[in-house]
Amino acid sequence: MIIAVIGHGYVGLVSAAVFADLGNTVWCVGRDPQKIARLNQGETLFYEPGLSELVKRNLAANRLNFTLDYAQAVKDARVVFICVGTPSSETGHADLTQVLKVAEKIGESIKNNAVVVCKSTVPVGTNRRVAEIINSVKKKNIKFFSASCPEFLREGTALSDTLHPDRIVIGADSEEAFKVLIEAHKPIDGKLVLTSIETAEMIKYTANSFLATKISFANAIAELCEKVGADVEKVMEGIGLDRRIGRRFLYPGVGYGGSCFPKDVKALIAIAEVHGYNFELLKEVEAINKQAVANFNNKIKKHLKSLKGKKIAVLGLAFKPDTDDMREAPSIKIINFLQKEGAEIFAYDPIAKETASRVLSNTHFCDDIFNCVENKDAAIFITEWNEFKQLDLLALKKKLKTPLVFDGRNIYDPEKMRKMGFTYYSVGRK
């Protein structure tokens, strides 16, 4: 099958590489000549485990192609996936500028009986708007089909999530669209959910907002646990063993970040407002997420009293492990707070140094964790990288000027840390 993928960001590049590896001929369209040139040389534009190898293999096999030319990519495509960004606007609504521009370009080049599919996360009604735009510019004798096929990949496990998803959601209103997309996804072992376009659009927002709600719920319980002297990790373990609840995403810390949860929660609140519903629950989810960072910052300031002139090691910058994504990363808010209070920041992340350097100013970036913590007044853990879980804690203690640790992801055992002589703060544990 010939497939066109519009966009080479996170969703677009992963989707293009996976569908090429499944034996399809895939054309991936971008708008930046320099980025397209880098991609054609096999250089991925962000970090994702296994992705670079997948791109290089399929480039070599001539199954994966990168281009600036819509006509070249779309003219013979059976499926056209729209995978461009939908960032939050100032009002919280999804900014559909890129999606709608892409729709017009697709309409100018589309072939007969192609299926145009939004994989981008878009509000209800967007696929209909895309179809209207394509209809307004396409040749009169061209027939096409619309569909929604939202993605559910997670950064750090994107390849596995694409090949082995929990479900494949296909929203369409024509048998032809269902037939073609079922065939395209045949090698992928997820449960098919076939539904209307509007329902498919809602499923993605609902899923991400619910997961964000679980994180905020865990953080709300963590705050209460600190006040009553309970251990939030044991509380979450206790309720997580209930099969009706489960433990996934019930991990307290410094809140959620990344490219999806913050913007999708905002977008669903905005969608609700347009339709006359005040989504107070999700507004509180947002508020709790902000408070989680504030609570953590307050612990640091309360203990150190004055941060002026203090040298602080910040360990972990990306919003989660196994990615270099700094979008809405809690580390940004924490570092900005520390710097505003007069602290000097030394930072280490095994992957995200380059992307972090674009968004963090006046920060010393280190290539080694022990160089980062040497002679520092405190160490702050923000991202739960595996190398931190196996860290030589005695060496950490020797390197620090003061054995003071603030753990924003509950990586370590509080009793063990105290027995080793650390002053140790975590989230939701006394």
Image (spheres, rainbow, N blue to C red):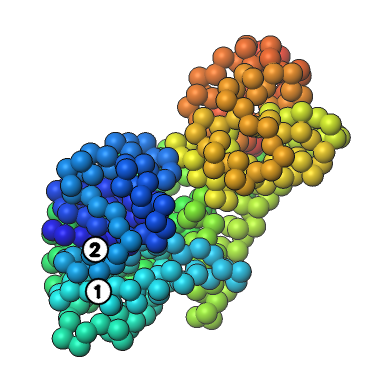
What residue is rendered at 44% in x and 62% in y?
85
Q: Which residue is mark 1?
A: 109
Q: Which mark is residue 201?
A: none
97 vs 228: above or below:
below
Amino acid type of the residue tagged 1 in the rendering: Ser
Report the quarter where the C terminus lies.
Answer: top right
Q: Which residue is mark 2?
A: 73
Identify the secondary structure beneath mark 1. Answer: helix
What residue is rendered at 34% in x and 77% in y?
104
348 or 416: nearer the viewer: 348
- Residue 7 percent location from the top left of the image: 36, 59
- Residue 253 percent location from the top left of the image: 59, 40
Q: CA distance from mark 1 to mark 2?
A: 9 Å
Report the quarter where the N terminus lies.
Answer: bottom left
312 or 37: nearer the viewer: 37
Identify the secondary structure beneath mark 2. Answer: helix
- Residue 50 percent location from the top left of the image: 32, 36
Q: Residues within 10 Å of mark 2 (few under 14, many from 20)?
A: many
Amino acid type of the residue tagged 2 in the rendering: Ala
Check whether the beta carbons of the residues at disc 1 and disc 2 lie within 8 A of each other: yes
